[in-house]
Image (cartoon, helix red, strand yellow):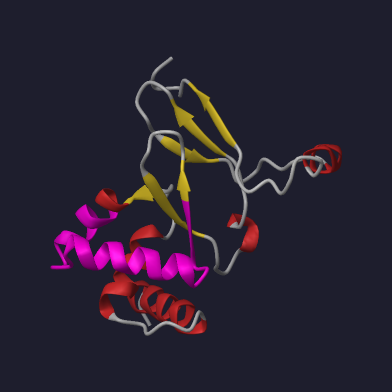
Amino acid sequence: MNQETTDRSWARQMIQASGLRATTARVATLLALRNSTPLTHAEVSTRLAEDGIDKATVFRNLNDMVSANLLRRSELGDHMWRFEIIAGEDQAHATHPHFVCVDCGTVSCMDEIELTKKSKTASSDYGQVTEILLRGHCHDCV
């Protein structure tokens, strides 16, 4: 079995396990987000345009997969929703901070960063932390 077949099989299984139908467009949408930083609707649409998948279908599929807890939708301070996979073979991608460059706008996942036990306890005084966002200047812009 080649890598493309394996990837499509993975995507179909993930979508079906969430209770959604594994349509060609949903499989392509999930694969576009696999191994990437959080992407906007426009970025996903651009990647899928060559497959003939229109923007409305991409938007609907992104939101369906958010509702099914396959994807996380985040707004990182620039009034644009970004989408990323939260379920998969490695659950380490479940909750993590993001770094946004204030100059070029690139978004990076900071999977290796975790709140300390003391930070988690202190933050619980305010509520449930669902997102941590760090802003600064990336290496390319410094």
Q: On screen, 139 above or below 61?
A: above
Question: Furthest-front residue in view?
Answer: 126
Q: Position of residue 111 (x, y in %)?
A: 60, 46
Q: Residue furthest top?
A: 142
Residue 37 in picture, x, y percent from top left: 43, 47
Q: Pinpoint residue 5: horizontal percent, then vertical percent.
A: 35, 79
Observer-nearest of 18 and 77: 77
Residue 48 inside the magenta-drawn segment: yes
Q: Hey, which quadrant is residue 114 in on the image?
A: top right
> In the rendered structure, which segment of residues is drawn in magenta?
44-73
Q: Quadrant location of residue 103?
A: top left
Residue 93 vertical position relative to residue 126 in the rendered view, above or below: below
Nearer to the camera, 122 or 141: 122
Q: Is residue 41 left or right of residue 91?
A: left
Q: Within the magenta stretch, is there residue 133?
A: no
Which quadrant of the rendered structure holds the N terminus? bottom left
Q: Position of residue 88 (x, y in %)?
A: 55, 68
Q: Main secondary structure of the magenta part?
A: helix
Residue shown at 48%/39% (left/top)? 108
Residue 94 left/right relative to 55 = right
Q: Which corner quadrant holds the C terminus?
A: top left
Q: Nearer the viewer, residue 72 or 137?
A: 72
Query: Which residue is found at the position 61% from the left and 57% from the top?
Result: 94
Q: State whether residue 118 is above or below residue 31.
A: above
The residue lying at 46 percent from left, 82 percent from top is 13
Residue sitting at x 36%, y 64%? 62
